[in-house]
Image: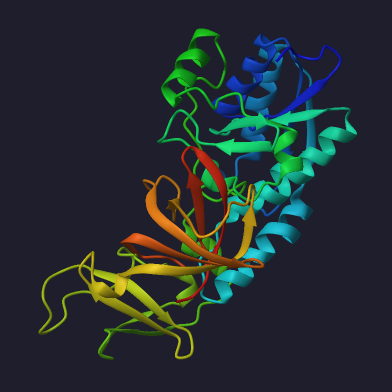
Amino acid sequence: MQPVADSLIIVGLSGGVDSSVAAWQLLEQGERVEALFMKNWEEEDRPGYCAAAEDLADAQAVADHLGIRLHRVNFSAEYWDQVFSECLLEYRAGRTPNPDVLCNQRIKFRAFLDHARSLGASAIATGHYARIRRDARGVHLCLSRDARKDQTYFLYRLDQEQLAASRFPLGTMTKAQVRDLARQIGLPTAEKPDSTGICFIGERPFRAFLARYVPEAPGPIETPEGERIGTHRGVAYYTLGQRQGLGIGGIAGAAEAPWFVARKDLSRNALIVVQGHDHPLLLRREITATRWHWIHRPALPLACSARLRHQQPLQAVQVLSCRRDRCTLRFEQPQRAITPGQSVVVYLGEECLGGGIIEDD
């Protein structure tokens, strides 16, 4: 497809290497490109966790290197109201939400898209590892070439309007190719480490951070038989399958084996733990997911594949039924530590069809 000379694409420039290369790729394709740096977190923090100033400086250095204009916008209020506050409700209910999924749906591909249009853009672009395919049926979200970096899991809640206005220049590249290209063209971010942690909030000791918003509520850590073997700080601070940070030492009469969180008994504020990575209480085949979103809805029942977490290899599954926004799925093989609040995302071949939020068992 030939670029439209008068159309403007605004790249979400985060100050990282991926968005930097995405901007360069669009310029190489002959597009008219500008960039936007989004600030989305206002809370005061110790340096190093939420380095917005450093990221902005890097984004400006990249924009200067590429010769493009850099806009700035503050979406902190939107992020708090539309993403973080909802995640806090989930944590308080004992579930484990995924802020990145909501952040993409409501901030990166909604607030950003709307703001870019107000600046005259016809489309936005990001450094996500994903591909878009267009045909007579609409826009299709597809796996990236780099399976280890694929980010369609975080993008499954985007709708046709959002996807139609989005560009993913890195979708056909591997991370190694992105790094090599950044070095070749002398980008200031070529050697910058990848960011991890909570979307827009950054890397930090998670339990201490969450405790600022969800008060500790100590309770018993128990075996499935009801024996108390420790005390937790609050069920919100733990996730199913978790091994580290339980504070359980050797238990008299118990085998020397690691303990894992298997269940949360919210009615008693109890954390149920088991020994053994693949203990039966950690395994399930059938799940229910709500708040389901289809990018393209297929005929059901459907044999396809799914993942329950980012970077999990795709698993064979059947989507048995969907009524309104509630779907039932059955996996071919038992799945470990299926976590309420997280997302299950389904695929047909290379295409991401949609997904939903895992319900309590």
Mark yes or no: residue 213 visible: no
Picture quarter containing residue 13? top right
Q: How many marks?
A: 0
Q: Nearer the viewer, residue 313 or 238?
A: 313
Picture quarter containing residue 142? top right
Residue 166 image offset from top left, x and y in percent:
70, 33
Q: Residue at x 65, y 46 (%)?
A: 104
Q: Image quadrant for the N terminus?
A: top right
Q: Is residue 61 left or right of residue 120?
A: left
Residue 179 image offset from top left, x and y in percent:
46, 20
Q: Residue at x 76, y 41 (%)?
A: 161
Height in image: 141 above or below 295?
Answer: above
Q: Residue at x 67, y 46 (%)?
A: 158
Residue 137 image offset from top left, x and y in percent:
69, 38
Q: Image quadrant for the C terminus?
A: bottom left
Q: Nearer the viewer, residue 208 or 294?
A: 294
Q: Nearer the viewer, residue 115 or 318?
A: 318
Q: Residue at x 89, y 35 (%)?
A: 118
Q: Is residue 128 left or right of residue 277?
A: right
Picture quarter containing residue 5? top right
Mark yes or no: residue 209 visible: yes
Residue 303 image offset from top left, x and y in percent:
44, 53
Height in image: 65 above or below 147?
Answer: above
Q: Nearer the viewer, residue 147 or 183?
A: 147
Q: How is the structure coloured here? A: rainbow
